[in-house]
Amino acid sequence: MMLTMRESMTTSGVQSNRPGEFFKKLSVAALRDLESMEFPTLYQPGMQLFSEKCTPAGIFIVVSGEVKLSINSSDGKRLILSIAKAGEVLGLSSALSGLPSEMTAEVLYPARIAVIDRDQFIAYMGRHPEVYQVVTQELSLQYKVACEQLRTVALSGSAPEKLARLLLDWSENGQKTEAGTRVRFSLTHEEIGEFIGASRETVTRTLSSFKSRRLVAFHGSILTIPSKGALQTLAGM
């Protein structure tokens, strides 16, 4: 009986074609076992997957769409840490520790999410001990992303510098065109402010300044950066 392409893969050979480094590092057996537990559900924008100070039901695999990860203060201020996209796995820290989450996960764009119960995921790792190393690497990456975001907010100087750094970060996965780098840009000015620790009014003024200086251009929900070098200079990079 001939094997399918997926069945013939090995950990040292062809990698999974699923997005996300987490899945590419799994063995064939571990990947197939995990996929057998996935039953994605469609979540609409604004729906919370889990919130800080509450213990999530398990892990959340982003199959498609985007999820906003944030932390909130007691007086209602919010800092967005990152936007999780397809291929990312959320809730790993709480799943391993059994402790409440330190962040809130809210659907930003319509997303298909697979939820795997904590006990089920722990049993899964017991069947595939090599997954512990993959999970550790994923947690380290998530920690690094959070630190980079906090560094941008706390240690960068002005709002223009912070916004320039944010746009450059988003442009890393953008589409390269003759007019510059294009990225989808559908966040509100208030949400952008939550990324860089600035008010909505400050974001509006700063973006207007960027447009007048031809550092960025908008076409609907598409943002174009004509010259990343100019933004890098502004960001002090």
Image (spheres, rainbow, N blue to C red):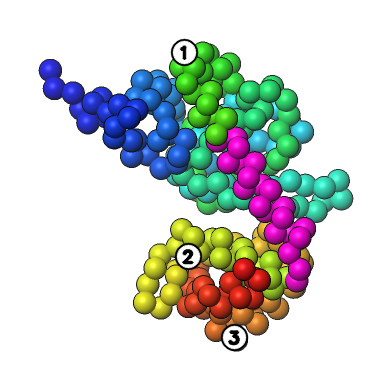
Query: CA gap, disc 2 to disc 3?
Result: 19 Å
| Numbered tag placed on residue 213 in the rendering | 3
Q: Residue at x 55, y 35 (%)?
A: 138
Q: Secondary structure at mark 2?
A: strand
Mark 1 is on which residue type? Arg
Q: Quadrant of residue 11?
A: top left
Q: Position of residue 89 (x, y in %)?
A: 53, 36
Q: Earlier in the sequence, mark 1 or mark 2?
A: 1
Query: CA gap, disc 1 to disc 2?
Result: 40 Å
In the displayed structure, would residue 147 be above or below residue 117? below
Q: Residue at x 82, y 47 (%)?
A: 73
| Residue 143 drawn in magenta | yes
Give the quarter of the figure containing the N terminus.
Answer: top left
| Numbered tag placed on residue 127 in the rendering | 1
Q: Residue at x 50, y 29 (%)?
A: 134
In the displayed image of the protein, which residue is found farthest to the left? 1
Magenta stretch: give its range. 138-158
In the displayed structure, would residue 36 be above or below residue 112? above
Q: Which residue is mark 2?
A: 183
Task: Say whether marks 1 and 2 touch (CB < 8 Å).
Answer: no
Nearest the camera: 140 or 17? 140
